[in-house]
Image (cartoon, rainbow, N blue to C red):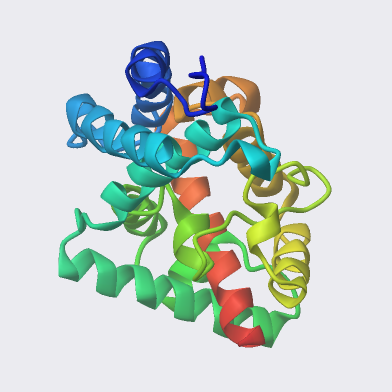
Amino acid sequence: MYTAQGRIKQSELLTQYMPLVRRQALTLQVRLPASIELDDLIQAGMVGLLEALGRFDATQGATFATFASQRIRGAMMDELRTRDWLPRSVRRSARAVDSAVRQLEQQLGRAPEENEIAQHLEMPLSEYQQLLNDTNSGQLLPFEELVADGGEPSNNELANSPFEQLLDGQQRQTLIEAIEALPEREKLLMALYYQEELNLKEVGAVLGVTESRVSQLHSQAVSRLRARLHDSA
């Protein structure tokens, strides 16, 4: 794997780790809207792998496999962050939901129920649930959106997140409290989706609900987290 001078044989590593790029792309794709092409993720991941080959320093202690995996995933995340697949009207509606959740939590002193949020927004429950489905497509990577650094939050169930070290103490504590305040089913959903890395269909099988319902609950959980983070800002 190394030359006599200790430098990585890049061509050998490139060949060795190309399957890792594809595996990570496949794992990510099943959790994203259908409009996201596998080839786009693979292309971004290859950029990350090449970057890893150029920047890896064996004297820093980390293995190349670990370093490359982080760079590959990071490059794919960067690619996704450059995309804006939600119409402006849906984004406005998503902000309205965030605002409604925030106001109701302040008024009620607890997490509001779905019907309470829908009533506050002056729309039928079915329309509110459809709105959750619409907004969820742009929130399948919510922790990257919630945290400016791009790190994922953690609570006791998510404590082993590979991005935990990217959060400062205050951010981490705020996110722990926000996640702990989620209704139990939504908290379980987030743990299954982000820690266990199940896709929406698999989460639905665990919770005993449809994939569409998981999408709604996920979007609602994101709104609750954003409301909490907004209040602490």
Q: Is residue 4 visible?
A: yes
Residue at the spot 49% in from the left edge and 71% down from the top edge: 148
Q: Nearer the viewer, residue 153 or 77?
A: 77
Residue at the spot 63% in from the left edge and 30% down from the top edge: 63
Q: Nearer the viewer, residue 8 or 200?
A: 8
The answer to whether residue 212 is above or below residue 65 is below
Residue 145 position, x and y percent, is 44, 63
Left or right of residue 160, residue 194 in this image: left
Residue at the spot 42% in from the left edge and 25% down from the top edge: 24
Q: Nearer the viewer, residue 124 or 111?
A: 111
Q: Residue furthest front?
A: 4
Residue 39 position, x and y percent, is 18, 26
Q: Is residue 122 visible?
A: no
Residue at the spot 34% in from the left edge and 29% down from the top edge: 29
Residue 201 position, x and y percent, is 46, 23
Left or right of residue 184, residue 14 in this image: left
Q: Which quadrant of the structure image shows residue 14?
A: top left
The answer to whether residue 138 is above or below residue 230 is above
Quadrant placement of the C terminus: bottom right
Residue 164 position, x and y percent, is 69, 54
